[in-house]
């Protein structure tokens, strides 16, 4: 991405302040994540060549890193916009970009600039690669599905106090998980690795998608669980899903087993910015044994994923899937 | 674009409400412009084949229309976001999308969805066309330049009351015009027509860009003039550039010829939400003879454009340029 900075200096006729403004937005928003998504692309390339008894060339590793950075730009684009819509305060231990007094709603355009830079980077490094068109189409497919996921998430969240428990169904939950997170967090890096390594078989992409979506669903249900039962010392943040009236794994499971009187308790206490009411909901979750249910759910997904991964052994390198699964299974933050 | 609606119904596993939500956003934001940009693509295709003594086939006209709609999606994407950032109230005679009480800041994501739909449409209709990659790259180039134009515009506008006349230079003005409007309004439709007709010569694209950027600069200076001196009955809107502290053709020209005491008048009255001060600025513009200067400026651009267009006669069809020039020259709204 140093190339981007160089290009901003030389290729465009920009006044210095505009260039500095963009560079600052990049520095602020792109590099501070865990970079797992980016590392996954590199991991896939290594596994692919290792499976053939070869070593991935420096060029391939470099290209994989570029694609990894492109994912980070894509994520920055979505996160800057997401924080505005969610009226969030902090992100990755610093104020959200739009919260900086000199930025404000200009951040809407800054998120658009970050997305546009991703395609500038792609074009620069892959314009003549055989996989250019496929990679391009993939980024667009994922942008589309992620924006649909955001839409589902935004429209499923009623205003606070305006609770409609009927919308908290497993089908809605899985759909939001899949579109909002699973595609770009799990499928995108794996599929980019596959395109980079020249894989063309559409069947293999379907298989990869199936495994990655399952991982994404597991990942997001963990996110929900941690939001409520995680240790803020480990996670670095205090969850607010209950007061925010979110459709989560916990509330969906609770509704599956709750008696009419327990449903009434949820009805009266969910989605209110009131500590006492939040505590009532958490208490109900505990008495409905959701922590034990969650453990069972996590193991069930793990077992299923391991067998899905075993089933594709030989068709494509599976090291990346194990790498991802190890990162997420029983995670506490 | 009926195809989009059909695809939203069939291709994606979306709940009905999400689908209806997207369809409503499309209806509200895409079709209500003047469609000039879209018509320009069709015009170019007709001119191109007419120049060869042929008639453009129904298929080419259909493809040109699809590209025209793609420009309207791109514009909708930018306008929805722009209205949020500018805190605008109305657009095309209806409330801005984000101003609808049930939409609000969700409109940030709706603008992203509109952009994503544009690439869905492109992929659907052009996936196998010889010009697919070129069209794709062009849309990205234009998205990038337009987002940079927005950035230049947003960062050039100081807070009200915080007036720095030194930033109101011709170089800054032309740069904003070029990036924010000229590329997507004039160059994009012409260049799409060129790609659709199979033109490959990079020289011709440079020539087209040069002419189109000039037109865009003329168009935007007219916009500034009309904002101040236009008839609200004709334009349908009341200009606020002076109170908004905008870098406009008028203020740049005024500063070129103003005496120190006239500069002081500007310094004291520009960029304030105060009718009396706005009137003082307008009075100064009149006494500096900006209306006459504007007429001269418009004629000068017209003459220059006509000679640039004449110079490319024979290399590419020029009917589209004359079509555009006729639409904008001496326009009053
Ligand atoms: Mg958020
Ligand atoms: Mg959100
Ligand atoms: Mg969460
Ligand atoms: Mg505006
Ligand atoms: Mg604006
Ligand atoms: Mg204007």
Image: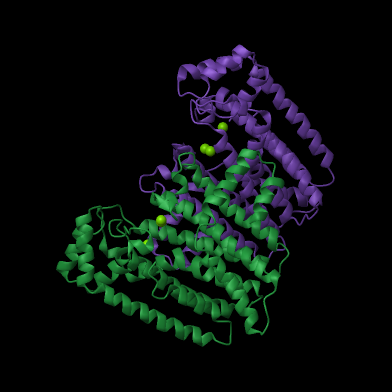
Chain colours: A green, B purple
Quarter of the picture containing the N terminus of chain A is: bottom right
Residue found at the very far front of the displayed protein: A233
Determine whether, in the image, residue B75 is placed left or right of residue A328.
right
Answer above or below: position of B320 versus B123. above
**Can the viewer see residue B11 in this picture?**
no
- Residue A173: x, y in percent? 36, 67
Q: Residue at x 58, y 64 (%)?
A: A68
User: In the current view of this chain or complex, which residue is farthest to the left?
Assistant: A261
Q: In the image, is A227 to the left or to the right of A91?
A: left
Q: Nearer the viewer, residue B200 or B274?
A: B274
Image vertical order of residue B236 relative to residue A281, above or below: above
**Horizontal and vertical percent for residue A274?**
22, 53
What x and y, as percent, mark residue A331? 40, 72
Residue B157 at x, y percent in the picture? 54, 33
Placement of A305 over or under B189, stated as above or below: below
Residue at (56% x, 76% y) in the render: A205
Give the position of the C terminus of chain A as an image quadrant.
bottom left
Q: Which quadrant of the structure image shows residue B119?
A: bottom right
Residue for point 57% across, 15% down: B264
Q: Quadrant of residue A295?
A: bottom left
Image position of A32 with respect to A253: above or below: above
- At x 62% / y 79%, what residue is drawn? A48
Is any atom of residue A197 visible in this view?
A: yes
Is residue A326 or residue B26 the one in the foreground? A326
């Amino acid at each position: 991405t140093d190339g981007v900075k160089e290009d901003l200096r030389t290729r465009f006729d920009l006044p210095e302040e505009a260039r500095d403004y963009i560079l600052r937005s990049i520095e602020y928003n792109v590099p501070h994540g865990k970079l797992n998504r980016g590392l996954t692309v590199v991991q896939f390339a290594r596994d692919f060549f290792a499976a053939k008894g070869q070593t991935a060339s420096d060029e391939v590793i470099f290209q994989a890193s570029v694609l990894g950075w492109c994912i980070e730009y894509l994520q920055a684009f979505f996160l800057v916009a997401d924080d505005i819509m969610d009226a969030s305060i902090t992100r990755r231990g610093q104020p959200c970009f739009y919260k900086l007094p000199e930025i404000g709603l200009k951040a809407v355009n800054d998120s658009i600039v970050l997305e546009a830079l991703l395609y500038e980077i792609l074009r620069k490094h892959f314009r003549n690669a055989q996989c250019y068109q496929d990679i391009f189409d993939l980024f667009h497919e994922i942008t589309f599905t992620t924006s649909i996921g955001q839409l589902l998430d935004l429209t499923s969240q009623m205003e606070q106090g305006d609770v409609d428990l009927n919308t908290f169904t497993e089908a809605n939950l899985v759909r939001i998980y899949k579109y909002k997170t699973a595609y770009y967090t799990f499928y995108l890096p794996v599929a980019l690795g596959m395109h980079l390594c020249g894989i063309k078989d559409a069947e293999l992409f379907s298989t990869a998608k199936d495994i990655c979506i399952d991982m994404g669903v597991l990942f997001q249900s963990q996110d929900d669980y941690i939001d409520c039962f995680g240790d803020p010392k480990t996670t670095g943040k205090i969850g607010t899903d209950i007061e925010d009236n979110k459709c989560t794994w916990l509330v969906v499971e609770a509704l599956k087993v709750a008696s009419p009187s327990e449903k009434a308790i949820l009805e009266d206490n969910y989605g209110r910015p009131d500590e006492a009411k939040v505590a009532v909901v958490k208490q109900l979750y505990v008495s409905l044994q959701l922590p034990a249910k969650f453990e069972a759910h996590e193991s069930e997904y793990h077992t299923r994923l391991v067998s899905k991964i075993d089933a594709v052994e030989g068709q494509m390198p599976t090291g990346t899937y194990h790498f991802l699964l190890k990162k997420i299974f029983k995670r506490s933050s």
